[in-house]
Image (cartoon, rainbow, N blue to C red):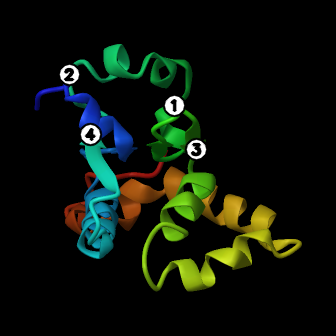
Amino acid sequence: MNTDLPNTLRRRSTLVYDGDCSFCRRWVARIARRDLSGTFEFVPRQTDGLTKRFPKLGEGDFDTGMRLITPDDAIHVGADAAYQIARSLRYWRKIAWLYHVPGIHGLTRSAYAWIAAHRQSLSRDCDDGTCKPP
């Protein structure tokens, strides 16, 4: 994948996800199907040159969740990224406001952290027992 993208693509937000995780790939596919306006660019974290393109990505632990990098280079992680995605997609934006209900924000972050830690065991391709939670 070419990481030297034209500036026109940087007007989109970039969703960086674990390309080795089938659970993650399934969710990215769901998001992509709903991204009718091309709001997002989808890039696996295993892409060569990714940290050269986004140096701040080298500072965090990717096991904490996906990253959403907005055109102004803000980075949203995990549940915060999911919220930003939801508020950008038709139909999902109708429920995105729930993220700001008292108590829901913390609950959503906790749930996302659990899912991120167990994403390999939540994958459908782990029937052979090779995927184990960390």
Would you place residue 129 above or below residue 90 in this image? above
Which badge, 4 or 2, comes first in the chain's sequence?
4
Would you place residue 68 above or below residue 36 in this image? above
Question: Three-letter amino acid code at disc 1?
Answer: Asp
Q: Horizontal placement of 132 versus 83: left or right?
A: left
Q: Give the labeled residue for mark 2.
A: 48
Which badge, 4 or 1, comes first in the chain's sequence?
4
Marks 3 and 4: CB-CB under 8 Å? no
SS type, badge 2 = loop
Instruction: State which mark lies toward you, 3 or 4.
Output: 4
Marks 4 and 2: CB-CB under 8 Å? no
Q: CA distance from mark 4 to mark 1?
A: 13 Å
Q: Give the labeled residue for mark 1.
A: 73
Instruction: Assess disc 3: are there few (<14), some (14-19) or many (≥20) residues with their C-alpha within 10 Å of its C-alpha.
Output: some
Q: Give the labeled residue for mark 4.
A: 9
Question: Three-letter amino acid code at disc 2?
Answer: Asp
Q: Give the labeled residue for mark 3.
A: 76
Residue name at image x 61 percent, y 83 percent: 95
